[in-house]
Amino acid sequence: KNNPLYRVVKEKTEELAQKTGEQAWCLVEEHNQAIYLYGSHGDRAIQTHAHVGKREELPNLAGGRAILANLPEAQREKVINAYPFDNDCELPFSDREGLIERLEQIQTDEIALNTESYVKGVNAVGAPIIDNTGEVYGALTIFGPANRLKEEYIRSEISDLLLGVTNEIGINLTYR
């Protein structure tokens, strides 16, 4: 709650959860990991293991990749070099090149997708929270069951909603 982003994202995270009916979370980067800062559950949200303070590898989560893709290059390299690439496919990425390609795509698309790549049956979308100077504060992410949160629906409706909210937060952070 002492994180300066907490007060700014609380209302917006709740708004996203209410509008989509799904889980909405704000993630921040700390010590090269994703930390769940604040979450809200819509009326159709599924139960997951996400909770405030939980840590995950940045590349595993849609919101984590949204953060990672926009970090300064030296910090991004440090995270990538420490990632435990898994050739047994238990993690979303088994090789460095695949992760780097995905991060480049996220920079182009402005959103990060997880389509059952980390948790079977769950899809997620994340967008970075960046102020007008380029500082990355965190990311907002929405996730739900894959049969309801389909990639087409994410790209056609959810992404604009999410990007609108993250842009608004970024502007407010610039001029606070």
Image (cartoon, grey):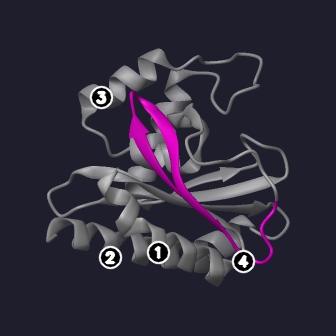
Q: Which mark is residue 75?
A: 3
Work out whether mark 1 precedes mark 3 in sequence or the reverse, and give the earlier one.
1
Q: Secondary structure at mark 2?
A: helix
Work out whether mark 2 precedes mark 4 in sequence or the reverse, and give the earlier one.
4
Q: Secondary structure at mark 4?
A: loop
Q: Secondary structure at mark 3?
A: helix
| Most foreground residue, 22 or 123 | 22
- Majority SS type along the magenta span: strand
The magenta stretch spans which residues? 26-46
Work out whether mark 4 precedes mark 1 in sequence or the reverse, and give the earlier one.
1
Mark 4 is on which residue type? Gly
Count of numbered circles on the image: 4
Q: Which mark is residue 21?
A: 4
The quarter holding residue 20 reads bottom right
In space, the residues marked 4 and 1 are separated at their CA atoms by 14 Å
User: Residue 21 in the image: x percent, y percent?
Assistant: 72, 77
Quarter occupied by the C terminus = bottom left
Mark 3 closeness class: few <14, some 14–19, many ≥20 residues within 10 Å: few
Residue under label 1, please give it.
12
